[in-house]
Amino acid sequence: MQDNVFSRSLITGPLERALAPTTAAPPVWIARMDRALAGVEEAVESRGRLKVGRLGEVSGLIPSPGVDRRLVRLREALGGLAEEASAIRDEMRREVERAPRLGPASLRRFHRRAAALLLGLEEYELEEARLILESVNTDIGAGD
């Protein structure tokens, strides 16, 4: 497995593994994807309780309207990502109830949506890390 910063993420790791190429039967893949999406929902909910993860810890350090706006945008983005994870799970369940053996087109569609969700989560985490870094690494005495 390729070692990269995103594979170590608690929020994206399970989804990344579920999206990896597999020879598993569709019901096994669907169950794995459902668990991964449930994990995304749980991790996002947990971050929400913690004031958007690590951001809640640093948002008060530097009074800045720019930082506050970015924090609001990140909170909104995180909420949208959670909604998308829920929507994918709900749609997969409905489709499996209608036709327990999903066809290749349905599987590809769910795979594409989950891959787009993964990309959004990775972008969120990167922006979150940037904001934290910028919030704690101030240039004290700049302009003196």
Image (cartoon, grey):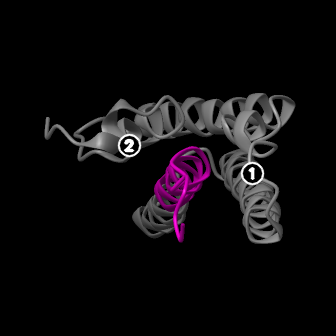
Q: The residue under label 2 is which amino acid type? A: Glu
Is residue 140 rendered magenta in the image? yes
Residue 124 within the segment the image draws in magenta: yes
Which residue occupies 54% across, 62% down?
A: 120
Q: Give the residue at mark 1.
A: 62
The boundaries of the magenta stretch are: 121-144
Q: In the depicted view, which residue is nearer to us: 129 or 44?
A: 129
Q: Percent from the top left, x then y, of residue 83?
A: 79, 55
Q: Residue at x 69, y 47 (%)?
A: 89
The residue lying toward the viewer, choosing from 54 and 66, is 66
The answer to whether residue 94 is left or right of residue 134 is right
Relative to residue 79, is residue 37 drawn left or right?
left
Q: Residues within 10 Å of mark 2 (few under 14, many from 20)?
A: some
Mark 2, residue position: 16
Mark closer to the observer (2, 1): 1
Front residue of 116/30: it is: 116
Q: Residue at x 72, y 60 (%)?
A: 74
Q: Residue at point 74% right, 33% down?
A: 57
Q: Is the magenta region chiefly helix, strand or loop?
A: helix
Query: Helix, strand, or loop for circle 2?
Result: helix
Q: Residues within 10 Å of mark 1 (few under 14, many from 20)?
A: few
Quarter of the image that includes the C terminus:
bottom right
First along the sequence among labels 2 and 1: 2
**Residue 52: quadrant of the picture:** top right
Q: How far separated are the C-alphas under marks 2 and 1?
A: 34 Å
Identify which amino acid the numbered label 1 is placed on: Ile
Specify the label residue 43 is tagged with. none
